[in-house]
Image: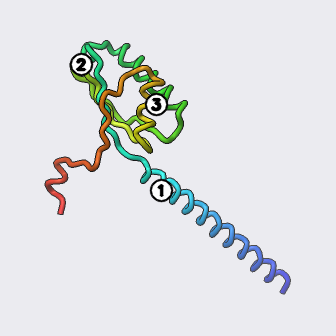
Amino acid sequence: MKRINRHILVLTMMLLAGFTSSAQTAASNHSATVKAKQMKTYLIERDIPGAGKFTPEQLKAISQKSCSVLKEMGPDIEWIQSYVTGDKIFCVYKAENEDLIREHAKKGGFPANKITEVVTGISPATAEAN
């Protein structure tokens, strides 16, 4: 009888541990979801004369500077991608607010001439959506 009670106790403890772990995982996932919902997408226009003629080494140096500033600033701002044209670089960022975009530009030493919050996106898939 004691052996059965001990097995029941062990099983109960294992179940409780499993439920606790599941609850912690769900709470963590919920926290990540809430965090992602707080991040907005921004399009940043940077006037940089001659950007389209930068060498791969120059572009790498700019990228490294940006990444080091982002690392210092923490998880509330994220660089998604940039597009280089003749005299401009257009960047896509996720951030909690526009002030973080400005802070990143100031710390990195590059311009943020125009910052626009992206409301939504469309693509060829939008034409096919029901």
Question: Helix, strand, or loop for circle 2?
Answer: loop
Q: Find residue 5 and report its horizontal and vertical position in percent.
A: 80, 82
* Residue marked by disc 1: 34
The answer to which image quadrant residue 59 occupies is top left
- Lower sequence index among marks 1 and 3: 1
Residue that appears at 52% across and 31% down: 71
Residue 103 falls left or right of residue 6: left
62 and 106: which one is in front?
Answer: 106
User: How many residues crowd mark 2 within 10 Å: few (<14), some (14–19), many (20+)?
Assistant: few
Residues at discs 1 and 3 in contact (Cβ within 8 Å):
no
- Give the vertical position of 90 relative to 59 (above or below): below
Label 3 vs label 2: CA separation? 22 Å
Q: Residue at x 31, y 12 (%)?
A: 55
Which residue, given by chain and number where applicable, does mark 3 sit on?
103
Kindly indicate the quadrant of the structure image that contains residue 60: top left
Q: Amino acid at mark 1?
A: Val
Nearest the camera: 13 or 64? 64
From this view, report whether residue 23 is shown above or below residue 41: below
As rendered, which of 124 and 90 lies closer to the eye? Answer: 90
Label drawn at residue 127: none
Nearest to N terminus: mark 3 or mark 2 = 2
Circle 3: residue type: Glu
Residue beneath disc 2: 87
Q: Position of residue 91 (x, y in %)?
A: 32, 32
Horizontal side of 41 relative to 18 (left or right) equals left
Task: Categorize mark 1 by other alpha carbons within 10 Å: few (<14), some (14-19), many (20+).
Answer: few
Number of marks in the rendered image: 3
Q: Amino acid at mark 2?
A: Asp
